[in-house]
Image: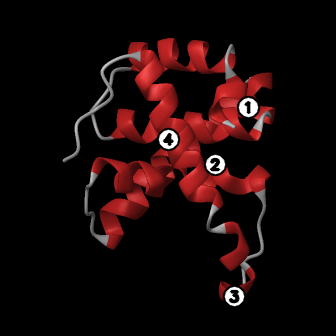
Amino acid sequence: MNPLPANREAWLNEIARALHDASEAIPFGPLVGTAFGVAELFHLGPATALKFRGMRQSKRSGREITEAALASYVATATEGAGSLTDSRVAFAFTYLATHFVLNLVTEEQVAELMDYIESHPEKLS
């Protein structure tokens, strides 16, 4: 497994790289019958998190991790988390939620990192 970032600035930099990596899939969407854009990149947060950690998962466990991270996103967005309307912040949320599901970070760490990301979303571009 690849090491976790050591501080919140390192997390922000990693998530920016992960977002860029995920965005490279956009042109290939139509080729597999699923056109999508920047607003839908949060769906790729879990898969990108696994990739950046260097973790190989079975289809079943990968699906379970993805479902858990996306369910957390839906629950948070439903509560009125306005920051998730920013596609960069939404991607960061599912990326970090995946780390939480994998027991690599705590809920407190995710909350702290999300607060930092929400106040610096431009650094994810």
Counting residues from the start of the chain, the first of labels 2 and 4 encountered is 2
- Please report contact status of discs 3 and 2: CB closer than 8 Å, yes or no: no
Which marked residue is nearer to the observer: mark 3 or mark 1? 3
How far from the left and from the top, in percent, is residue 36? 77, 66
Please name whichever residue, 93 or 68, is drawn nearer the observer in this view of the structure: 93
Q: Earlier in the sequence, mark 3 or mark 2?
A: 3
Say which element carries label 1: helix
Residues packed near mark 3 inside 10 Å, few (<14), some (14 to 19) or many (20 plus): few
What's under tag 3, amino acid-wise? Leu
Q: Do the residues labelled 2 and 1 touch (CB within 8 Å)?
A: yes
Q: Please name the residue that numbered disc 4 is placed on.
A: 95
Give the CA separation, mark 4 to mark 1.
13 Å
Where residue 109 appears, x then y in whole percent? 40, 16
Q: Residue 42 carries which label?
A: 2
Q: Residue at x 62, y 42 (%)?
A: 91
Tell me which numbered mark, 4 or 1, is placed earlier along the sequence.
1
Per the rendering, the mark at residue 31 is 3
Task: Return the disc, 3 or 1, that comes first in the chain's sequence.
Answer: 3
Mark 3 and mark 1: span between their CA atoms? 28 Å
Secondary element type, mark 3: helix
Q: Is mark 4 on a helix, strand or loop?
A: helix
Question: Is there a contact, CB below 8 Å, between mark 3 and mark 1?
Answer: no
Q: Is residue 16 above or below residue 30?
A: above
116 displayed left or right of 31: left
Q: Quadrant of residue 74?
A: top right
Between circles 3 and 2, the one closer to the viewer is: 3
Q: Which residue is drawn at 49% across and 53% down?
A: 67
Horizontal placement of 32 versus 49: left or right?
right
